[in-house]
Image (cartoon, grey):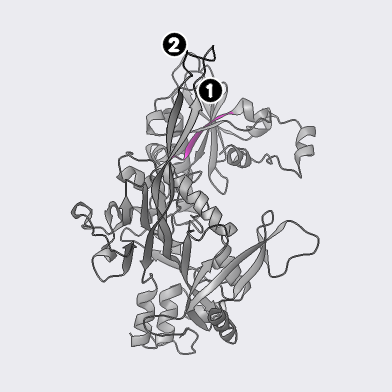
Amino acid sequence: AKQQEAESWSSVPPKTKNNKKNNNKKTKNKKDLWKDALIKEVGTNCRAEMCGLNSKDHTVYARVVGDFENQSISVGKVLQVMVDEEWDQLIHQILERKQTVEKDAYPSATGLLELGAVWLLNETLYMSGGGAAAQRLSTKSADLVPDWKDFTLRVHAVPQRYFVAHEYDWTKYCRGRLIGGTIAVSIDGVSPPVPFSGMPDSKDGVIVYDDPKLGFAVLCKPAPMPGHATLDNHAEDCCSMFQKALENTRHISLPPRLDGEYLDTHGLLLVSTQKQFLHYMEHTHLDSLAGYSKTGVVKKYRALVCVKDPDKMDLLESYVQKGTIITHYYNHHSKQYKKQKPKNDNKWHAVKMRVTAMGCETSGLRAACVATPYKDEANPDHTLARRLWGIASETPAQDLGVKYVMQIEVEPLTGRLHQIRCQLAEMGFPIVGDAIRGGGVCETADHQAHKWTRMALQCCELQFHEPERFEVKSRSTSSSSSSSSTDGSDNKKATTKSKSYVPSKKKCSFQLLDAWWSEMLYNYEQGI
């Protein structure tokens, strides 16, 4: 968090290898940071200074100056002044510039604290170049009176919201476990029952499987929403929502290197509810990547991809039949992917995946045509294109240069962020909804008119070996001032016991049999 604090503070560039020398030469000046600050009275001879109200990301910095030592200027009071000013500017944008604003996009002062969008930073540490010591504030901090001499508030006035999180009940199981058989769970070849207390009610649940004794749960993650907290939102992510549902009774975290495409991907998500299981999964996954273990983690993803060149479909089918491992090279610094590794450049690392299936397994549909000159609602090609990319355009597929869409399944063999979408885009198959790489924008909304975009990428299969507790006994000689005890006998050796997780023979398998676009493809086949 310290690095993110320093990078996002005002317009001062963060310390990197490239500008480290320049930062040492230039002296940071507080007056430059607050030169154009907006000033509002918050007390007698006491005022709040705010800068960043007009910034693109609405990151506002606020501090209190003047005679604040003899007055109790709380965090909540400064926040309320800032929110009032933000709303005044919002009204100006709506009335004069005729801009549209999404519902609930501008939270109240209490809402900002509930979302975790308010940070308390030590300004002196930052100005000295030692990094920004930051603390995320909560609703309990509304009455906090910090020493405004050294502290500054950083407020994400318009935090990124994930309204889809509130469409589900995080204490209940998924309906797919009970109705339709769209979710398959197998623990050592046996499908465990759903507890009666976990039956979904008015809202669908997210729990696929929960084992509090071993310390893990598998969720069906909605999209788009992050797996863990972000800088401006600590309430609408999977870990926070699940922990709140459990009333903070268990440790919640994501096993490292297993969250993958955490924001835009929906589907199976492994959550650790005990630190012991967290360490077990980390070591198991690392061993499987290194080839040391046959009991590693297997994850498969289902994607709906755009086909712009139909001739490439035959090449992709040959990869499936031969089990070809597809390799690209990734630069961690530039975030770029290339098919060939540049010579004499060690910054590029190999990323690998395997395409395991192509087309719809249930119906045998290889690909669906979405490019048609006919704009008739009865035409299935035109209807499918509009269902996927919306009705903003009459010919969304032609606008993107897409002729077909095709469902595939891939298995990543390495764990780089955005690896699947980048590798598929390099092959000429961008994922539907991946606007950055040519897949267009897929927009949807809930019953409260909250809008969000989604991507046709789903974690559809997860396999790993269930852990079992292994007791390790170790002996250590007790220390004493003499080599023998008072009765002349040798010192006794103390036996200590420690428990750790090791892979058992029981195999855990979880599968999702459909995705949000499955019904669209079915209707396409039926001509609906």
Indicate the quadrant containing the N terminus: top left, top right, bottom left or bottom right: top right
Q: Residue at x 54, y 42 (%)?
A: 59
Could you say which is closer to the camera, residue 398 or residue 206? Answer: 206
Q: Decide if residue 417 is on the left or right side of residue 297.
A: right
* As drawn, 58 above or below 420: above
Q: Is residue 106 magenta?
A: no
Q: Amino acid at mark 2?
A: Asp
Q: Amino acid at mark 1?
A: Trp
Circle 2: element type: loop
Which residue was labeled with disc 2? 487
Residue at 45%, 46% (x, y): give it.
278
Q: Which residue is denoted by mark 1 in the rendering?
A: 148
Please say whether residue 416 is visible from this viewpoint. Answer: no
Local SS, label 1: loop
Residue 367 x/y as whole percent: 47, 84
Mark 1, other Cα within 10 Å: few <14 / some 14–19 / many ≥20: some
Q: Main secondary structure of the magenta part?
A: strand
Q: Which residues are magenta?
A: 116-122
Would you say 118 lies left or right of 182 here?
right
Q: Report the Cα–Cα distance between label 1 and label 2.
A: 66 Å
**Identity of the residue drawn at 32% across and 63% down:** 185
Residue name at image x 37 percent, y 67 percent = 512
Dot 1 or dot 2: first in sequence order is 1
Query: In which quarter of the view is residue 287 placed?
Result: bottom right
Describe residue 115's horizontal placement relative to residue 476 as left or right. Answer: left
Which-is-in-front pick, marks 1 and 2? 2
Residue 252 appears in view: yes
Foreground residue, 343 or 498?
498
| Residue occupying the far left of the picture | 196
Q: Work out whether residue 319 or residue 297 is closer to the camera in this orientation and state it.
A: 297
Occupied quadrant, residue 54: top right
